Image: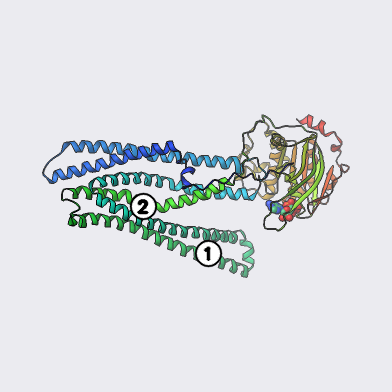
Amino acid sequence: MSKSKTTKRAAPSRPVSALLPLIGLADREILTRLVVTGCVAATANLISLMSLSAELNGWMRGEVLDTPFLIFCLSLLVSYSFSKRFVGLVLTTGFSALAGVRRRFLQTVTLGNHADILDMQARRSFDLGNHHLERIAALLPNLSIAANMMLVAVVAYLYLWTLSTVGATLLLVAGTMIGGWYVREAQRTRALLGQAKESEVRMLQGFSEIVGGNAEIKLGKARRDELAQAVEADVAQWEDLKRRHGRNLGELFSWIATIVIGFSAVFVFIFPRMGALSAAELPLVTSVILFLARPLSKFLNAVPDYIAAEDAANQLTTLLAAMPAAEYAPSKLARAPRRFSAIELRDVRFAYRAGLRPEPFVIGPIDMTIPAGSVVGIVGANGSGKSTLLRVIPLLFRPDEGQVLLDGQAVEGDRLESYRDLFCAVFQDHHLFTRLPQGPTFDAELFREMLVYLKIDHLVPETGDGLLNRDLSKGQRRRVALAVAVAEGRPIIILDEWTSDQDAEFRTRFTNEIIGKLRALGRTVIFVSHDGNAASVCDVTIHMTNGQMTDGQMDTPAETAASRPATALLQETA
Ligand SMILES: Nc1ncnc2c1ncn2[C@@H]1O[C@H](COP(=O)(O)OP(=O)(O)OP(=O)(O)O)[C@@H](O)[C@H]1O
């Protein structure tokens, strides 16, 4: 079987902004609509200001002007409705694009038909990706308002240009210089936040170690002090970085107000004295400058947020580029297959990807046959590769070499999904879903019957829903999980050390009864066990030693039920 581990997408060339394409605003048509809407809103905004200022001038001259008031009302209305459209367009486009990213997570990381289905790396990427996504989503409303304000500032600035070329040029030069400084400062402030986040992660890890290992550290004073000191150091570092960040942010925001008022002062105090502005122009220019102050400070205030969102978008884009290309498609299977004759593993070899160890753990080459209806036990020492093999058989881990055959045909391409559908499993780290399967193949009657058989029915509500809401012990959870697996009706049941959390009664019942019951239901059972007696109920016993299969012959089954032809049993229950 050919290896199909993470197929990486080609790394894209780095664009000017990672945020805009990510939130769907790099699209030319949307950008044009945004600019037009924003400019109409900004112009209307400016007209309302100008009519206000004209009215004020009129009053000062002892005149009452009716027309500007009408213009004021109309322009205010236009400004309101177009600003609303602008912000709405940014937010709807942005959130739709972010929902698209979420769908991509769903299709690739969570459900993707790729090798690393249980890979921690995929889970980490998912958590990290979600974190970035949340940050961008939280900043988006603020940024959309700031973008709208930026257009208002641009229009007001263009108007200022018509009133005072010297003033507008001075403003542009000073604005470029001060803006450059401001962005650099905002980046430095943002970097502090990044460092604070790192120490926060370490600090929270420390806290969860202390909470998780509470019982252990209560028994060992030295260990407790050591952990407490490490967490205290992280808390102190986090505090220091957060304080510096807060101070810098406060300074930046104060600068905004100072800069804007400083500019107004230049226009009001200096320009008229220099003769650059006439007494008639002064009130108009001053009102434009004061008008500029509001959108400008709103825009500048959002710069640190924008840097944070760009940072998150950059990381998210890198993550998306590295995501596996294999995508999930809704199942075409109307009904899971219920019959097969045999599964064969031929020269199968699987290696974990290199991690902390210099040499990754390898299993194989494995050769084995699993006839339908048989009971296969996998035994061996800790770390010998039993659980790994248990994930290779249903192809949750795809072999690097060799083939898996279903009824003599290699399981590849389109056959993979229907092959996996033959199995249900209770792994060591199994997940008990909050809702029972809803499909027609789930046998609710058999589920209740199994709950009674496994003596857990009194703790599971009649509907079966909210299973996880019940405070079940580990052993009880495994019993419920087994009942669900059986009721799902798939022909093969995988059990990884199912007895490890069971009491003495159920440990004994597992080999003496439960396996026999599953066999009688026509199920093929593949299980891992440390129980020395397990081999006595198996048709095939696989002995694993350091990833190698040292023995895998068909033993004589201890249970008489096994002597019935497997296919006959399957046909009975299908
Ligand atoms: N995700 C992983 N990445 C890399 N190596 C792993 C991973 N999971 C397990 N291993 C390694 O593979 C080896 C076999 O692990 P496996 O869980 O299959 O053993 P096992 O026989 O089931 O052990 P146990 O009886 O303790 O459950 C171990 O040495 C383990 O360190």
Mark 2 secondary-structure assignment: helix
Instruction: Examine the image and state in which quarter residue 510 appears.
Output: top right
Task: Say whether marks 2 and 1 touch (CB < 8 Å).
Answer: no
In the figure, 175 relative to 342: above or below? below
The single residue placed furthest to the bottom in the displayed view is: 222
Q: Is residue 451 in sight in this rendering?
A: no
Residue type marked 1: Asp
In this rendering, would 192 be left or right of 182? right
Give whichever of 518, 373 is nearer the camera: 373
How far across and down, in percent of the image, does residue 530 sit?
79, 52
Name which residue lies at 64% across and 68% down: 220
Residue of label 2: 300
Compute the Cα span from label 2 to label 1.
Answer: 32 Å
Mark 1 secondary-structure assignment: helix
Name which residue lies at 31% across and 56% down: 174
Residue of label 1: 234
Q: Residues within 10 Å of mark 2 (few under 14, many from 20)?
A: many
Give whichever of 443, 535 is nearer the camera: 535
In the figure, 205 relative to 44: above or below? below
Q: Tag 1 or tag 2, which sits nearer the N-term? A: 1
Give whichever of 247, 473 is nearer the camera: 247
